[in-house]
Image (tube, coloured by chain):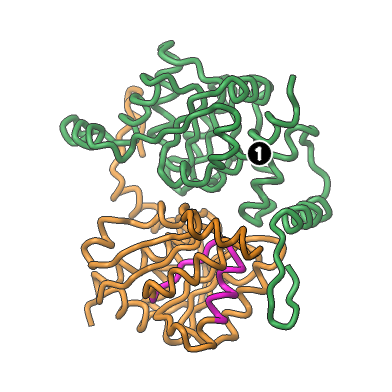
Chain colours: A green, B orange
Amino acid sequence: MTMNDGEIILDPAAIETQSFAIIDAEVGAHTYTARQWPIVRRVIHTTADFDFARATWFSPDALETGLAALRNGARILCDTNMVMAGVNKTRLATLGGSLSCHVADADVAAEARAQGITRSLLATRKGVAAGASIFLIGNAPTALYELLRLARSGAVQPALVVGVPVGFVGAQESKEALVAAGLPAIVCRGRKGGSAIAAAILNALMILAEESQP
Amino acid sequence: MTMNDGEIILDPAAIETQSFAIIDAEVGAHTYTARQWPIVRRVIHTTADFDFARATWFSPDALETGLAALRNGARILCDTNMVMAGVNKTRLATLGGSLSCHVADADVAAEARAQGITRSLLATRKGVAAGASIFLIGNAPTALYELLRLARSGAVQPALVVGVPVGFVGAQESKEALVAAGLPAIVCRGRKGGSAIAAAILNALMILAEESQP
């Protein structure tokens, strides 16, 4: 962005290129592969927080199974509407994917009240029943725990779990449970995470899926 | 959150209370007032990032004019749909407020293409024309610059500008321009910010508006 006689000249593509160059220059040494780094860099771009250059963790199979699912038009479940709002819909449509979030569904809310359990947990069950194979969890540890339970029971075999709940109570533990579960996963270890990060990781993966056809 | 025989027991209110206690215990010395601190604390709660205990800036009149507008059912303009998705709609309805975002409107997109300017800029103009008085800007420096231009021209007198664009190119400069403008404002100075933070600040303000009637 440059200012010129009070006029703002803005080219989003140029700004992104310049931002990535700044991140590359400032990040220092890291251990990510050439395919992992664009994902981590987009998270840093979204947060301006270089902690993610240490905290972001990939299971060995995460990119392979996640990208394959994206190229085949995956059903993607988000734990909040904020995650869903952050996903690039144009890119997703090009890949033939679909996106859903059930946490605000009326039937989920009614059943949560009736059963005395969280809407996030029931929304995860509903998404699994609908055939989701990629899971974006930016907020709710209960959504992540329920997904892990369903995976253990054989009810779902996720192609990718983006597990990045944020917070001081329960979030970190839920992410370590995901790391330990042996599923294809991308995780921000520690307390940090959130909706914007979950969406950024998917957006970066979709660019990779388009660029690097197998 | 506690685990008990594999069942997760989660009480969101209890988790929030416990999270706030952890933040209070870890934050150390800060200079925020008793009314400012719940806002900063909710930003830290949303990000797990204590940098916001230094970066968050309030203009002297921000809380007074912002809370007054919220209690009178303010029209609130968001720069992205992700900000809008993060706002607590139940609380906003109780206060009689309304929420809009025009960045994805078809007429805004068409006019942006025709004029060769950004959708964010035109979406700001449309929101001002519709009578918005509270502005949540979590992403687009151009939205913030256009709002500052409209305020200088007398086209709008904001009750509150939440100016928290994130990024490496232009974001910081746009926020310093807001600080310098003398408007009622809450700003995250530096590079950090984002949609979740803009929404968190409004959510915290709405709780204050309900709790502390004048």
Which quadrant is home to the N terminus of chain A? bottom right
Q: Which residues are magenta?
A: B133-149
Residue on which the image places disc 1: A204
Q: In the current view of this chain or complex, which residue is farthest to the left?
A: A114
Question: Observer-nearest residue: B43 or A34?
Answer: A34
Left/right placement of residue A200 relative to residue A119 reads right
Q: Amino acid at mark 1?
A: Ala
Question: Image point 29% across, 36% down: which residue?
Answer: A119
Q: Residue furthest front?
A: B114
Residue A23 position, x and y percent, is 77, 53
Q: Nearer the viewer, residue A6 or A168?
A: A6
Residue drawn at x 53%, y 42% is A87
Residue drawn 22% across the image and 78% down it: B213
Question: Measured from the top left, where is residue B120 in percent x and y?
Answer: 56, 63
Q: Quadrant of residue A179?
A: top right
Q: Chain of mark 1?
A: A
Pick whichever, B45 or A154, lies toward us.
Answer: A154
Q: Is residue A71 above or below residue A7?
A: above
Q: Residue at x 46, y 49 (%)?
A: A168
**Considering the numbered disc 1 on the image, is that residue within a helix, a strand or a loop?**
helix
In this orientation, does residue B104 appear?
yes
